[in-house]
Image: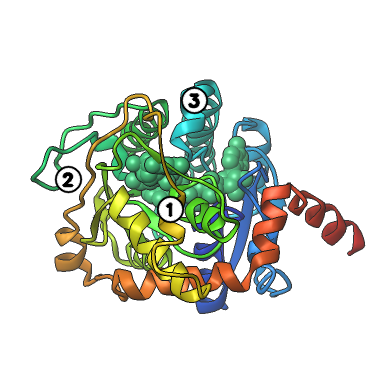
Amino acid sequence: MKHVLVTGGAGFIGSHVVRRLVTNYPDYHIVNLDKLTYAGNLANLKDVELNDNYTFVRGDIVDGAFVQELFAKYDFTYVVHLAAESHVDRSISNPIEFVMTNVVGTVNLLNAAKHHWQGKYEGRRFYHVSTDEVYGSLGDTGLFTEETRYDPHSPYSASKASSDHFVRAYHDTYQLPVVLSNCSNNYGSHHFPEKLIPLAIHNIVNRRPIPVYGTGENVRDWLWVEDHARAIDVILHKGSIGQTYNIGGHNEWKNIDLIRLLCSLLDKKLHRKEGESASLITFVKDRAGHDMRYAIDASKLKNELGWIPSVTFEEGLEKTVDWYLANHDWLQNVTSGDYMHYYEQQYVKR
Ligand code: NAD
Ligand code: DAU
């Protein structure tokens, strides 16, 4: 049985990755290491938490000694590293947390892999999950390729860029068998409602103002989270060592157009008059250093590994909206902080 470490598996994307690996690979033992920050939520994994091939470990990747002990306990074949502070706005108000988790935490994991694998790298993989934000901001045209020069603007993207550089440095210096991917904006179920799409859904449902930064002209390239999880699965198993793969949905939307689409979808679902939800749109002060446009060229992943997105945006967005409407309790718990009690109850009981 292969032991596979997934970091940040209680978060948005991590929980989809854990579910996929636990379900599709019964001969893998998935160890989910997560600190359970405000963004980590074990309720995201209720459906797989009792599986025999799944173990949850609460811990902090910034604690180097703890990370070394975990690697000594389990002889990991693969590491899939997603744990991070992930919200740009929080990075603007508290950059140091981002340096600690995203940079120091990543280097702790690299050190542990290097130490425990002892140069016996056959079959091993250290997979670092990164973001398109490291490439900076595009003008009206062009796409980010794997060769685009790094040009991060926020403390979040600077910390992710730094971690990417460390991962490549450990490959070049110590031959650590690394693989990286840089993905565009994800959307889907279990997304913490501080991010645009779940926040807008939550506010529309509750008839609260929908805050749109600046003019709403900024463009993001949206990918359904389950397609990202599938891309991670493909790259983990078939990607070439030392390589980077861009992942994206070929799906660019101006924020304001996306919000209008969501309003109109929710008007229908909630039996409101057309235009009722759009009246909640409220333009607010722009984000500092706000990147204008992200767009990914994912042709390397398509041509070399055969991955393409499986759903259209309309399909993915409708699935997402339906999930939030059907999981009102999840949203309530997350927004009230009650989900933290879930962990204590669930793990004290057993
Ligand atoms: P998230 O904020 O939803 O989840 C992050 C998880 O990491 C949480 O469960 C949290 O508890 C855990 N964590 C944070 N600090 C930790 C620490 N010190 N030790 C252990 N665990 C810790 O994030 P997400 O949106 O799921 O993003 C996951 C990864 O994917 C990140 O590396 C992010 O940079 C990258 N990414 C995200 C997107 C996106 O659109 N959300 C797009 C591209 C790449
Ligand atoms: O591109 C990948 C990145 O996508 C990931 O690396 C990040 O972890 C993830 O958070 C996301 O970053 P963004 O900053 O693009 O996502 P966010 O949902 O915060 O914002 C999306 C766009 O919407 C952005 O242009 C800012 C704007 N926005 C956001 C919020 C929260 C608003 O207009 N109003 C809001 O209330």
Q: Quadrant of ligand 2?
A: top left
Amino acid type of the residue tagged 3 in the rendering: Val
Q: CA distance from mark 2 to mark 1?
A: 35 Å
Q: Which residue is mark 1?
A: 279
Quarter of the figure with the N terminus:
bottom right
Q: Nearer the viewer, mark 1 or mark 3?
A: 1
Q: Which residue is mark 2?
A: 144
N-terminal label among 2 and 3 = 3
Q: Is residue 247 left or right of residue 224?
A: left
Whether disc 1's CB lies below 8 Å from ligand 2 is answered no
Q: What is the x, y in percent for residue 268? A: 44, 75
Q: CA distance from mark 1 to mark 3?
A: 39 Å
Q: Is residue 12 left or right of residue 41?
A: left
Which residue: 65% across, 38% down?
60
Q: Quadrant of residue 166?
A: top left
**Is 186 drawn above or below residue 53 in the view shown?**
above
Q: Nearer the viewer, residue 122 or 263?
A: 263
Q: 10 Å neighbourhood of mark 1: few (<14), some, or many (≥20)?
A: few
Q: Nearer the viewer, residue 264 or 99?
A: 264
